[in-house]
Image (cartoon, rainbow, N blue to C red):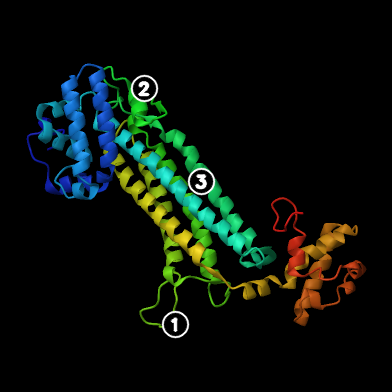
Amino acid sequence: MKLWQGRFEEETDPVFEKMNRSLGVDAVLLDVDIRASRAHAKALLGCGVLSHEEWQSIDRGLEEILQEYTPDEVKALPYEDVHTFVEATLIQKIGAAGQKLHTGRSRNDQVATDFRLFVKRAIGLVVADVEAVQHALVGSAAANAGVLLPAYTHLRRAQPIRWSHYCLAFYEMFERDRERFEQSVDRVDVLPLGSGAVAGSNFPLDRESIARELGFGRISMNSLDATCDRDFVVEFLSNSALLMTHASRLAEDWIIYSTDEFGFLELSEKVTTGSSLMPQKKNPDGLELIRGKAAIIAGSLTGFLSLMKGLPTGYNKDLQEDKAVLLSAFENVRLSMSVLRFTIRTVQLKSAPMNKAAADSFMGATDLADFLVTKGVPFRASHDIVARAVRSALEKGAGLDEIDLTAFSPFFSELPPGYLAAESIVARKRLIGGTGHRP
């Protein structure tokens, strides 16, 4: 069955039919399509298109389809899309009354409604996944509050920080991601049904009632915009790409930190693999896959934006690609968040190498410059003084805490004991947002 066949005399080319068919992708919308169709049928009852008996028959038939079929079963059936499947199956079940269901709507507003229902639910699931990762980060921070490590800039040791500070940096990144997804719900929460193909419907459908029935916060105000708007898809992809960018940065850190050269972390065997050739290998495949999926989702965002920017106003079949890219991103985000959460929960910190790296006294150079500032030395002058001390220590193969600093400034004779110890450096960063504990 094709919903549009009446105008055509010839059968479609089999290769084009394969290209045009979207059931393998949009079968996942089965439940939301039936929800939206039941709400539409009730609106048709309200405006007199359906009798009460016809409405009951349609509503019962749609519920039976939902109970009898799963999306995986629907995928294998010979229909163009999930909407065609539902309508054809309904007509087979209840007869002529089923032929009235599509009155006053187009697949254009039908698809947009279904997809918005799906995306609203998808956002809720992603937000829960992000919160689970945040919870894992807080758990690791609390369990390892006394562990120090170097913070890096340009992948060079910069200043010592607490492991808890490191974990909570990613908590903040994921918090922004969570907020972005939650804030986007309001822009998804708009009912397009009643917009028809492009100009609206000839029937007095109670759109506000449909919106309440389906849980939408408001209705679309322009039918032309409503049927071709996919901003919510772009926004979901954008939010997903940024979320995965943060996940990828954490993954990159931990891939590096778990190398023999760093030796800061030991990843669980449950999220690593071995080599088919080299028996000694323990590869961080889970984190590498997260890094890879981040790239794929960023590419999907770019690709879909490229698709959208060239479309004339109104619905165009190019938009059929929206579901494939969003569903792929949705699945990859959820997989990645799950693996990342488990990786965080099961990682073992090697506190000895981390604390040893954090004890590098050169990372106290800024603290030495700041000490001179407290003695009245301008910062640029104090920076130059400490830089000369650093150069001297490097030439001697010694640490900053192993040379006579008074040779560079007499004020250094007043340095408190242990001033360059990592714990002391960390403890001095007590302002809000710093790595030190506030009193």
CB-based contact (under 8 Å), mark 1 and mark 3 = no
Q: Which residue is mark 2?
A: 208
Q: Which residue is mark 3?
A: 178
In the drawing, does residue 378 fall left or right of residue 23? right
Determine which of the numbered discs, if any, sits on residue 316 in the image.
none
Mark 1: secondary structure: loop
Crowd tier of the residue under label 3, counting other residues whose Cα lies within 10 Å: few below 14, some 14–19, many 20 or above: many
Q: Earlier in the sequence, mark 3 or mark 2?
A: 3
Mark 2: secondary structure: helix
Q: Which residue is located at x 49 percent, y 66 percent?
A: 346
Q: Amino acid at mark 2?
A: Glu
Q: Amino acid at mark 1?
A: Gln
Q: CA distance from mark 3 to mark 2?
A: 30 Å
Q: Which residue is mark 1?
A: 280
Q: Which residue is located at x 10 percent, y 35 percent?
A: 92
Frontmost of labels 2 and 1 is 2
Q: Position of residue 394 (x, y in %)?
A: 75, 77
Mark 3: secondary structure: helix
Question: Which residue lies most toward the left here?
Answer: 9
Q: CA distance from mark 1 to mark 3?
A: 39 Å
Image quarter for residue 103?
top left
Crowd tier of the residue under label 2, counting other residues whose Cα lies within 10 Å: few below 14, some 14–19, many 20 or above: some
Q: Earlier in the sequence, mark 1 or mark 3?
A: 3
Task: Quadrant for the C terminus, please.
Answer: bottom right
